[in-house]
Image: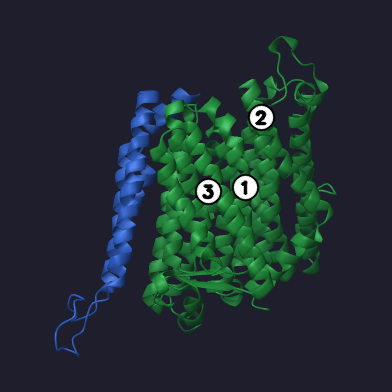
Chain colours: A green, B blue
Amino acid sequence: MNQHLPVLLVVVPLVAAPIAALLNRPRLSWAVAVAATLWALYAALELLSQTMATGAIHYELGGWTAPYGIEYVVDAANAWVVVIVALIGALVTPYARKSVEQEITEDRIPLFYAAFILCLTGLLGIAVTGDVFNVFVFLEISSLSAYALIALGNDRRALTASFQYLIMGSVGATFIVIGIGLMYVMTGTLNMADLADRLPEVASSRTIPVAFTFLTVGITLKLALFPLHLWLPNAYTYAPSAVTAFIASTATKVAVYLLLRFFFTIFGATFSFDVMQLDRILMPLALIAIVTMSLVAIYQENVKRLLAYSSVAQIGYMVLGISFASVLGLTAGILHLFNHALMKGALFMSMGCIMYRVGSVRLEQMNGLGRAMPWTMAAFVVGGLSLIGVPLTVGFVSKWYLVQAALEQGMWPVAGVVLLGSLLALMYVWKVVEVAYFREVDPELGISEAPLSLLAPTWVLVLGNLYFGINASDGVGVATRAAEMLLGIL
Amino acid sequence: MVGFYTLIARGNLVKKIIGLNIFQTSVFILYITMGKIAGGTAPIFVKGGEDVIYSNPIPHVLILTAIVVGVATSAVGLSLVIRIKEAFGTIEEDEIQDESV
């Protein structure tokens, strides 16, 4: 069975989704979702240890040899991404049960789980596939289910947020299809490894730069790089809490992975950065994202929206790491991809706990929650510290590498902006902490601590933040290997 | 491009979906045109004809998939429009924004 793991990783959740919908009982559907996500986590960990031990795994779908058939490839870079997605999925599902019972009407719960598992399937699929058209198909699977999940939010603005996301997401996906089509015209192949072989021959034509541009715009739309982030704040704010926690820590990360895959594996670092001079576009955009979005976040009154803007800023950090196109920079970007999933997961989950007890995440209703819900707010504080980049948390590790990468290339101002971003993060995190800890709680509300089934997954992520912050070498080792592989040094 | 313009310029949500559809369909046709080889026939094996030129069938297969995706996107989009109509009483973007404030 082990040799079929790459495909089973995707197929099992894909089959589980309709089962969850057909069972049509909230509890049963939930159990199916838990089983599917746990399976995905097991398969992902197994794949990671296999790739670490023996190198990349190639799996030919249906026995058709690549490049004719569709191939799944698992290597250091995407095994890592698969583990992140599966881990967050496996933590959010147990968390979702109570949170969803409260936020979604009962008859929709089975459909919620079906869409949730489908979204997970799509994200895992994007990560493992070695075929560019397959990427598009999985991208649409995950996006369509994400639209549905966001629309389930109980605020009616969730609908418009979802519609906005649908329009922008579909435009992004269509751009990606155009890019893929143009590449296919020039090379006659859709297999990623094959494309990488054949592209240099035709790279001087006009078609390939156009394809490259379409792909870049399409993917950056999906990953919400400034200024294409407009769909993100609304979508995160109005989606059900569990969905926000899941999508915020996985969907954009997978898009970042896709960016890495296209830039480095398919087009190659030389073409992307020397010929197309991608760094000249990405770096300013990333820096603008870090500064402006952090500033916008400071002025938000809704904490979920605050965190959403902060997400756009954090995506700026990842893209900044990529735009250095050096081993250190890429390591920083990939590390931040993982770390941001951990911290935003923890932060949005603690927001979900507050939503569960208080019924709102607006700042004025969070007075004194530090005393009423000590564990929840403690989770928020640790996540917040990690966001700022305080030592002993994961945020510190990736920022450290990012600053090092900037200094390595003698870019002092860039390092300065990274530190400025941390300072701004301190301001918006402090805003929440101040309200929660230094104001009197309204005793009439009778708010108590969130139930264990919500707190436990949140704290697993919080402890992950601390563990990978203190014992940084594991994460750094994997990220460095992935970075070296993408740059073609290994 | 016409579709893309409609998508951006129109405030009516249904028209936006139609714009999206036109945009996607034109991309589909782009794919189909590149599958055509000059003088090529339909990619069905002709008996005894080794030197027959066939059109490339792969873009067709890909687009078949993309059409399915497009249908699903329109379906999700339109059902969202219905729910927006229920919740806001309108499907004009500017009126929705007025109501949300």
Residue A388, above or below B38 = above
- Tell me the crowding category of disc 1: few under 14, some 14 to 19, or many 20 or more residues within 10 angstroms, Cα based: many
- Type of amino acid under label 2: Cys
Between discs 1 and 3, the one toward the N terminus: 3
Counting from the top left corner in percent of width and height, residue A288 is at 66, 51
In this rendered view, identify the residue nearer to me: B28 or A10. A10
Q: Which mark is residue A353?
A: 2
Q: Residue furthest top?
A: A444
Q: Earlier in the sequence, mark 3 or mark 2?
A: 3
Secondary structure of the residue carrying tag 1 is helix
Residue B21 makes an appearance in the image: yes
Q: Same chain for labels 1 and 3? Say yes or no.
A: yes
Q: CA distance from mark 1 to mark 3?
A: 13 Å
Q: Which residue is mark 1?
A: A88
Amino acid beneath label 3 = Ala
Q: Is residue A181 left or right of residue B26?
A: right
